[in-house]
Amino acid sequence: MRCLSEYKYIFLDLDGTVIDSAAGVTNSVAYALNKLGYTVSDKSELMKFIGPPLSDSFREFYALDDEQISRGISYYREYYSETGISECSLYENVENFLKELKRSGKIISLATSKPEIYAVRILKNLNIYDYFNLVAGSTLDSVRNGKTAVLKYAIDKLNVEDVSRAVLFGDRKHDVIGAHECGIACVYMLHGFGSMEEATAYNADIILDDMAAALREIS
């Protein structure tokens, strides 16, 4: 495995890697579930929704059928697009990390399972959009959905001919799985919504505590 400073293409997950989006996501899920007739007494139970595609989480955690999932996603977006999208913040040292990547001539891409239209708004709201060469996310019609599909799209758009020169920074098993399915390395960030146990269980290539550590490794 290369030293991190040797990678040319840097892919970044959004939720749990670049931003702390816990409030926005859990509030949006709670709103959707309430509209579907479910009572949410403890929003911390909804933290597991952060990261995976929303349809997968509704099916796995609440056993919703396709029609309920479709309505749940619509309700989620109803809240998220107006309020939840602003209920997030940058993790410490993210902008310093992006500045160093840019200074070093890296190609930077966001790669998120969140709908791309929302990801663009978030990056612009947080004044970091201009650091990215590409913003890749899922599509609202779910034609492009999940980390593997998003990464494949981003790799193609950036004309990455040698995937060994690409690395993804993420914080959940879905990031590790998606990266490895695309033939690229994955750095697992412990400041996000995963755990050391998950990182080791899914064979993350590098495990880092936070963006300060990432900044040291990439410099």
Image (spheres, rainbow, N blue to C red):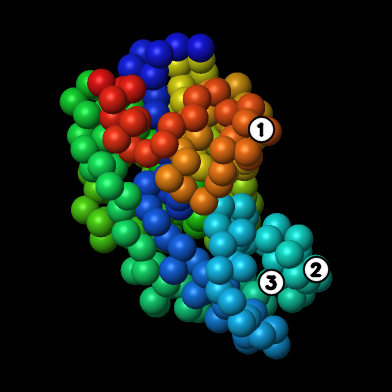
35 lies left or right of 6: right
Describe the element under mark 3 as helix, strand or loop: helix
Q: Nearer the viewer, mark 2 or mark 3?
A: 2
**Three-letter amino acid code at the position of disc 3:** Ser
Q: Quadrant of the C terminus?
A: top left
Residue on which disc 2 sits: 63
Q: Earlier in the sequence, mark 2 or mark 1?
A: 2
Decide: is 115 above or below 214.
below
Classify residue 53 by image quadrant.
bottom right
Describe the element under mark 1 as helix, strand or loop: loop
Q: Residues within 10 Å of mark 3 (few under 14, many from 20)?
A: some
Across and down, in percent, residue 28 comes to 51, 74
Q: Is residue 90 visible?
A: yes
Tell me the number on the disc at residue 70. 3
Q: CA distance from mark 2 to mark 1?
A: 25 Å
Q: Earlier in the sequence, mark 1 or mark 3?
A: 3
Q: Residue at x 63, y 81 (%)?
A: 40
Across and down, in percent, residue 139 comes to 54, 55
- Does the residue at mark 2 contact the one at mark 3 (Cβ under 8 Å)? no
Tell me the number on the disc at residue 202. 1
**Three-letter amino acid code at the position of disc 2:** Ala
- Does the residue at mark 1 contact the one at mark 3 (Cβ under 8 Å)? no
127 lies left or right of 16: left
